[in-house]
């Protein structure tokens, strides 16, 4: 079966220029050789710290920025070779849920207008039909249709996030890109929105790329998990293997930092921490393994030689000399 989305060796670099002559003085390596695929009805979670390149990756997938290198295939078709009509269809079938629901909604648009707009852009002229779709979609995300006349500032954070989810659903997409959709909500609302997303996924057989910085958040929703650090994937596997048999030191640190997961960790190998210091600058990445400057297990080989991204058990990939 052809995946809905397939990414091959995707890279996104930004030139660094200075001076009156705008001279090229360096390169910022934000996304550096990422490959993955997502099948229909499946959820792939992308987990990593802020600044590791997750949001830039989403922007490239959406077509808001061009990749420096690599391929993006939607239903097996390279997006770089798509016609304008095919790109428009891809945009309809691939929708985004943003982290900041207040910033994602136009402050002067009512809920109804925000949900109607993508339908109008794609040529639906029948106002009554648009209103019927808006009403049914609001019901699907657990909101009374009476909210359609309200403005974003008149809604709670949880209600606004449900509206952004509804807006992503009005075109009946096949793939949802969710950029930390619950990080701005309190804990009780996080659970509600996660349950809503899982219910909607089951109902519409949606595929989802779910971006987060906390492994505890994606535990229930993810079929597969990728761990990202400084633009590269450090570890990727089916969800259960990440929680039961994590191999990369960075993954183990992320697990330890999630209290709800750390309580169940008894293996001594999980008693890892980060070395003192900040994440290296993507414009000046360290030699060897990108994680060695913060890894408690790093040795001379880690400092000198970049590890291969290799399969250690079926479906479980790790970028580490010591895995």
Image (tube, rainbow, N blue to C red):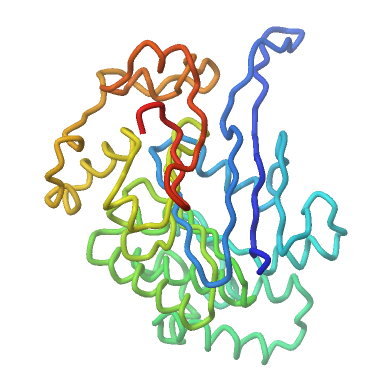
Front residue of 204 and 321? 321
Residue 283 is situated, as x and y percent measured from the top left of the image, at 55, 19
Front residue of 231 and 147? 231
Residue 148 is situated, as x and y percent measured from the top left of the image, at 50, 80
- The residue shown at (33%, 14%) is 299
Relative to residue 120, is residue 157 depicted above or below? above
Give the residue furthest to the front.
313
Relative to residue 268, is residue 260 depicted above or below? below
Q: Is residue 266 left or right of residue 66?
A: left
Residue 110 is situated, as x and y percent measured from the top left of the image, at 53, 72
Residue 27 is situated, as x and y percent measured from the top left of the image, at 63, 19
Front residue of 265 and 176? 265
Q: Is residue 299 left or right of residue 111?
A: left
Relative to residue 209, is residue 193 depicted above or below? below
Front residue of 207 and 181? 207
Relative to residue 83, is residue 322 depicted above or below? above
Quarter of the figure that contains the N terminus: bottom right
Quarter of the figure that contains the C terminus: top left
**Quarter of the image where one finds residue 157:** bottom left
- The residue shown at (76%, 68%) is 89
- The residue shown at (38%, 69%) is 155
Q: Is residue 220 left or right of residue 210?
A: left
Counting every numbered tag in the picture gives 0
């Amino acid at each position: 079966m052809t995946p809905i989305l397939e990414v091959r060796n995707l890279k996104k670099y930004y030139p660094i220029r200075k001076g009156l002559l705008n001279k090229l003085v360096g390169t910022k390596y934000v996304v550096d050789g990422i490959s993955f695929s997502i099948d229909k009805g499946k959820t792939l979670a992308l987990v990593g710290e802020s600044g590791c390149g997750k949001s830039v990756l989403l922007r490239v997938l959406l077509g808001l920025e061009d990749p420096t290198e690599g391929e993006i295939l939607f239903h097996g078709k390279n997006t770089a070779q798509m016609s304008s009509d095919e790109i428009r269809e891809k945009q309809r079938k691939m929708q985004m849920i943003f982290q900041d629901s207040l910033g994602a909604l136009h402050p002067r648009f009512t809920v109804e207008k925000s949900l109607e707009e993508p339908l109008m852009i794609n040529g639906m002229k029948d106002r009554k039909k648009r209103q019927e779709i808006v009403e049914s979609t609001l019901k699907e995300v657990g909101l009374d249709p009476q909210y359609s006349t309200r403005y974003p500032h008149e809604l709670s954070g949880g209600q606004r996030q449900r509206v952004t989810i509804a807006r992503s659903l009005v075109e009946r997409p096949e793939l949802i890109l969710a950029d930390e959709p619950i990080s701005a909500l309190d804990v009780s609302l996080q659970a509600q929105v996660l349950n809503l997303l899982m219910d909607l996924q089951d109902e519409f057989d949606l595929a989802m790329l779910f971006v987060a910085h906390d492994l505890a958040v994606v535990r229930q929703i993810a079929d597969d998990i990728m761990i990202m650090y400084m633009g590269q994937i450090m570890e990727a596997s089916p969800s259960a293997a990440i929680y039961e048999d994590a191999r990369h030191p960075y993954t183990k640190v992320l697990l330890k930092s999630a209290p709800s997961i750390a309580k169940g960790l008894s293996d001594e190998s999980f008693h890892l921490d980060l070395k003192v210091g900040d994440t290296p600058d993507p414009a000046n990445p360290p030699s060897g393994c990108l994680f060695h400057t913060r890894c408690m297990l790093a040795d001379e080989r880690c400092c000198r030689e970049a590890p291969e991204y290799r399969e250690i058990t079926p479906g479980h990939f790790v970028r580490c000399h010591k895995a």
